[in-house]
Image (cartoon, grey):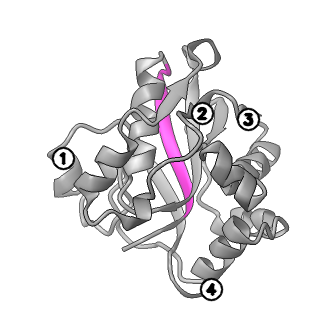
Amino acid sequence: MRRADGPRCRHCWLPSPAPACDACRSRPLSVRELRSGFVYDGPTRAAVLALKHRAVNDIAPLLVERSARIEPAGDIDLVVPIPIPLLRRRRRGGNQAERLASVISERSGLQLDSRAIRRRGWWSPRQAQARSRGERLRLVEDAFIVEPARVRGRGILLVDDVTTTMASLSEAARVLRAAGARAVDAWTVARTE
């Protein structure tokens, strides 16, 4: 498993000599910081796909422990998994982000809230088929519904399996902040490059 090491942008976790890459400096960001443990290729990709599509749940603790990139800021007090639509959740036998978030909550002592944010609708367009970052952002626009009472005044660590374009993380962070979250950081197992 190839670590996502070296100098990286703290907002999108892509390689960057500066703490914020040019792209992140030029657009408003909803995610304060992102951390990912591995580059999404080889054995990491195989492990994530096993968790996601074959419900190999025993791999979630291993991925979290090996990542060693979970150091929530002092103002973070709530772990929230990125939700997936209900039909996709049923087809997969669960939500891989929720499995990972549960392990992080157990290890860190932070509260887990899997109901703070949910997907709008039963199914959603396939983001993976989008040809560009802009198209992915459009596909997730208004895709999430937040329970304001669950997040108001809280510091949130959003958890997902893989970061590709940051579309889902950015949109989820945007609606969480609009609902009153004081800060939103994110963590994923892996980052595409």
**Residue 20 lies in the magenta-colored region:** no
Is residue 94 among what the camera can see?
Answer: yes
Q: Is residue 98 above or below residue 115?
A: below
Region in magenta: 181-189
Q: Is residue 19 above or below residue 117?
A: below
CA gap, disc 1 to disc 2? 29 Å
- Dot 3, crowdedness within 10 Å: few (<14), some or many (≥20)? some
**SS assignment at label 3:** loop
Q: Is residue 121 left or right of residue 172?
A: right
CA gap, disc 3 to disc 1? 30 Å
Q: Earlier in the sequence, mark 3 or mark 1?
A: 1
Q: Quadrant of the C terminus?
A: bottom left
Overall secondary structure of the magenta stretch? strand
Find disc 4 in the rendering and name its residue. 43
Q: Earlier in the sequence, mark 2 or mark 3?
A: 3
Q: Position of residue 46 (x, y in %)?
A: 64, 82
- Dot 1, crowdedness within 10 Å: few (<14), some or many (≥20)? few
Q: Which mark is residue 25?
A: 1
In the image, 83 versus 155, the foreground residue is: 83
Find disc 2 in the rendering and name its residue. 118
Is residue 33 among what the camera can see?
Answer: no
Identify the amino acid type marked 1. Arg
Q: Which mark is residue 110?
A: 3
The residue under the point 62% across, 11% down is 149
The residue under the point 34% across, 65% down is 14
CA gap, disc 4 to disc 1? 32 Å
Identify the amino acid type marked 4. Pro
